[in-house]
Amino acid sequence: MTGPFPVLLYHAIGTDRSSWIAPFSVSASTFERHLELVSYSGRTALTVGELRLGMAGNPPLPARPVVITFDDGFAEIADVATPLLARWGMPATVYLTTGFVGSVSPGGDRMLSWAAAGEVADAGLEIGAHSVTHPQLDTLSIADARAEVTRCRTELQDRLDVPVGSFAYPHGYSSRAVRQLVAQAGYDSACSVKNALATASDPWYSIARLTVTDRTTDEQLTAWLGGRGAPVATPGDRMATRLWRMYRRTRTLATRGRQRPHAESAERPSSPEGPHHPGGGLP
Ligand SMILES: [Zn+2]
């Protein structure tokens, strides 16, 4: 029986970050210490793709899984994270926003190039999709949301020549309609944020994750690895989430064309459902 387990969400690695992403970064030494804690926990590290197979029982999940994920595609995934993961013998899933590849973030942070993303894939990390332009998908028209979800997968598969089976919602935001689009686009899983422990019975298109930053203490991470210290994910959208989406849709209409990407952890960590933070406080 697989108990609650952590699916960890990282963004940038390294201390040389802009103020834009710094609150969502971890230093290289912190990241390595985290891998040490993961290793000592005795948990079995999986990619999201392997997790998804296990959730379907084929093959069954290990008793104590753990998953490491990265969102957005910061350059240090290749320079720093991939070698450290290899040293500790751990896989990970890297969700790339294709419109960011080879560019810099709004804060001036270097993102992976296509060549570096290819090296990450060649090193055995799983490549997942994180949209083209990092919008709040649940505030877009169905046609626009579908284009974000499908074009990202096609481009990643074409450019990197790897299968792409998993999607991560930008900012963690999804809706029933968005989750259906993701399934129709050929993905077999998708990650939310929720800042909750995942379970083997999480919906395949809304797997819960825990945001990790430099403010995440070793005690906190150790508790998560022990299957404690965070809410356990609940399926479906709660009323508060639906009301918050209505507010964001209205705001999107009012500010159309001025949206800029920001990190998933803009979601208020105290909320088990995740996103309830107006604007996220970031550019
Ligand atoms: Zn993101």
Image (tube, rainbow, N blue to C red):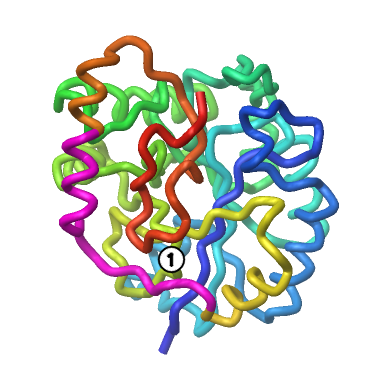
Does 134 sit above or below residue 258? below
Q: Nearer the viewer, residue 282 or 160?
A: 282
Q: Nearer the viewer, residue 189 or 73?
A: 73
Three-letter amino acid code of the residue under disc 1: Ala
Q: Position of residue 257 (x, y in %)?
A: 32, 10
Q: Position of residue 106 (x, y in %)?
A: 57, 18
Residue ID at (69%, 61%): 90
Q: Does residue 38 belong to the magenta stretch? A: no
* Residue under pointer 1: 196
Is residue 167 visible in the rendered image? The answer is no
Does 169 sit above or below residue 93? above
Label total for image: 1
Is residue 204 visible in the rendered image? The answer is yes
Q: Could you tell whether 188 is left or right of 243 in the image? A: right
Which quadrant would the N terminus be assigned to in this image?
Answer: bottom left
- Mark 1 Cβ inside 8 Å of ligand 1: no
Does 43 sit above or below residue 28? below
Q: Position of residue 2 (x, y in %)?
A: 44, 84
- Of all residues, the one furthest to the top in this rendering is 257
Q: Could you tell whether 39 is left or right of 1 in the image? A: right
Residue ID at (31%, 51%): 188
Residue ID at (45%, 56%): 49
Does 102 sit above or below residue 1? above
Residue ID at (73%, 73%): 39
Span highlighted in magenta in the image? 229-247
Residue 223 found in image quarter: bottom right
Instruction: Label 1, secondary structure: give it.
Output: loop
Q: Could you tell whether 3 is left or right of 201 in the image? A: right
The crowd level at tag 1 (other Cα within 10 Å; few <14, some 14-19, many 20+) is: many
